[in-house]
Amino acid sequence: MNEKIKKIKQFAEECLSHDTCSAHNMDHVMRVYNLAMKIAEKEKVDKEIIQVAVLLHDIGGPRERNDHTGKVDHAVESAKMAEPFLQQLGFSEKRIRHILDCIITHRYRSKNRPVSVEAKIVFDADKLETVGAIGVARGFVWVGKNNAHIYRKVDIEKYSKENLGGKINGRIKDKTKHSPHLNWETKDKYILKYLYTKKAKALARERLKYLKSFLSKLEREIKGKE
C-alpha cells in the first residue's frame, strides 16, 4: 500500500472503531480488499479506484445499524462520508465520482447496480463474503447481533411479502425473523446469477458447495436426523 492508501485505510479503521458488529468490521473490509485485488489481478482496471472503494465501502455501516427506521442505507451513507475525505486527499472530482459509484452499488439488497468494471469487482468481492466457511461464520455473528434464528425455514413467497417488501431480494424489515437458511433461500443460492466476473464466479462455486452442505447438515441435526 502506498501512503495515500494507508491514510484511507486508517480513516476507515477510525470510522469502524466503535462498531460492535464483527461481521462488518475492519477484518471484513480487509478480506474484501484481498478478494478484490485477487479478482482484479488479470483485469484491465483502475486498481486504485477499487482499493479506495473497498476500504471505504462499509464506513457508514454503524449509522445503518444504529438506525431503527430501516431507512438508512449504509452504502449511501458510506459514500456521503467518503466524499469530503477524498476531496481533502486531493482526488479529482471525476475519480471521486467513480469511487462513490463503486461504494453506492456494492450492496445486493438495493436498486443501485454496478456499471463500471471496477464497481462490479467491488460488488463481487463483497458478495463472496456471504458464502463459504466465512459466510457461515459471518452469518451466525449476524444472528447473534440481531437476535435472529439459528434455524428457521418458512414459505419463501409468504416471507418475502411479510419481511422483504414483497421482493425475494428486498431489504430485511425485521431482522429477528431472519435466519441463515432464509438467507440462503432469498440470496446466497442465487449468487452465481448476480456476480459479474469469471474469477468471482469460480471462487463462488466452491464456496457454495461448502455452505449448502453445512446448512443441510445443520438442518438434519436440528431435526434429529443425523
Image (spheres, rainbow, N blue to C red):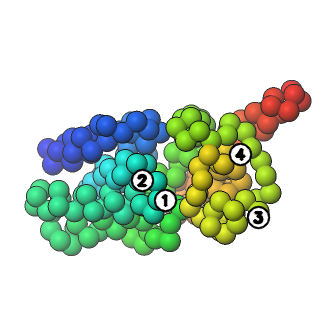
Label 3 element class: helix
Mark 3 in CB contact with mark 4 (< 8 angstroms): no
What is the spatial separation of the Cα atoms under label 3 and label 4, in whole angstroms? 14 Å
The residue indicated by pointer 4 is 181
Residue type highlighted by circle 1: Gly
Residue type highlighted by circle 2: Asp
Residue shown at 68% from the left, 36% from the top = 150
Residue 11 in the figure: left or right of residue 57: left
Q: Nearer the viewer, mark 2 or mark 4?
A: 2
Residue shown at 77% from the left, 63% from the top = 158
What is the spatial separation of the Cα atoms under label 2 and label 1, in whole angstroms? 7 Å
Nearest the viewer among 181 and 202 is 181
The residue indicated by pointer 1 is 70
What is the spatial separation of the Cα atoms under label 1 and label 3, in whole angstroms? 21 Å
Q: Position of residue 42 (x, y in %)?
A: 40, 55
Nearest the viewer among 214 and 204 is 214
Who comes first in sequence, dot 1 or dot 3?
1
Pick out the residue farthest to the right: 225
Mark 2 in CB contact with mark 1 (< 8 angstroms): yes
What is the spatial separation of the Cα atoms under label 2 and label 4, in whole angstroms? 25 Å
Figure quadrant of the N terminus: top left
Q: Position of residue 99 (x, y in %)?
A: 29, 63
Label 2 element class: loop
